[in-house]
Image: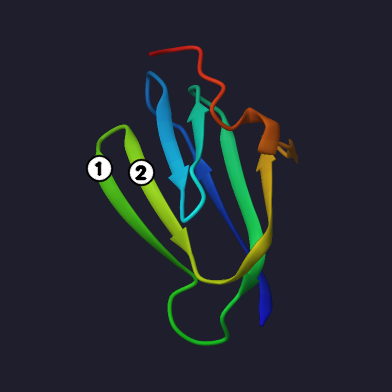
Amino acid sequence: MAQTQHTFSNKKDGPIYISVEPWPQCFELEPGDKLTLKWDADDSGDAMQIDFINERELVVWPNGKIDDIEYLFNGDPGEDRSWTFKHR
């Protein structure tokens, strides 16, 4: 397995929401925010599947060894930002 990372950046004019499965993690990104996921991906196949729910919601399914996935919010540890929303 190889260490990989994927960064999501919000360039919209309002918040976007990214859910990470199979765990029910969900992050609200304000305009300009970035969420980076780091994990050990499988050596073959897609590192991640991304499902677009609508223009402001994504569901991502990382593949590989994801028990120790790291969540970085604007470059800092960000797992504690899951389910912390300013907007409804």
Q: For the point 30% across and 53% down, which residue is it?
A: 51
Residue 28 in the image: above or below residue 54: above
Q: Residue at x 73, y 39 (%)?
A: 75
User: Which residue does the image show at 43% across and 75% down from the upper left?
Assistant: 46
- Label 2 with label 1: CB-CB less than 8 Å: yes
**Amino acid under label 2?**
Leu
The picture places residue 16, in percent across and down from the top left corner, at 40, 29
Instruction: Left or right? Give the position of 53 relative to 61.
Output: left
Quadrant in the rendering for residue 11:
top left
How many discs appear? 2
Image coords of residue 80 (percent x, y): 69, 31
Residue lying at the far front of the rendered structure: 23
> Which residue is denoted by mark 1 in the rendering?
53
Q: Nearer the viewer, residue 27 or 9?
A: 27
Q: Nearer the viewer, residue 21 or 39?
A: 21
Q: Residue at x 66, y 62 (%)?
A: 67
In the image, residue 25 sits, relative to residue 62, either above or below, namely: above
Number of residues whose C-alpha sits closer than 10 Å to that of mark 1, classed few (under 14), some (14–19) or many (20 or more): few
Left or right side of 77 for 15: left
Badge number at residue 69: none
Q: Quadrant of the N terminus?
A: bottom right
Quarter location, residue 45: bottom left
Q: Position of residue 18 (x, y in %)?
A: 44, 39
Q: Amino acid at mark 1?
A: Ile
Mark 2 burial class by Cα count in 10 Å: few <14, some 14-19, many 20+: some
Asked which quadrant contains residue 81, the reply is: top right
The first of marks 2 and 1 along the sequence is: 1
Q: Residue furthest right?
A: 76
Element under disc 2 = strand
Q: Which residue is mark 2?
A: 58
Identify the secondary structure beneath mark 1. strand
**30 to 36, vertically: above or below:** above
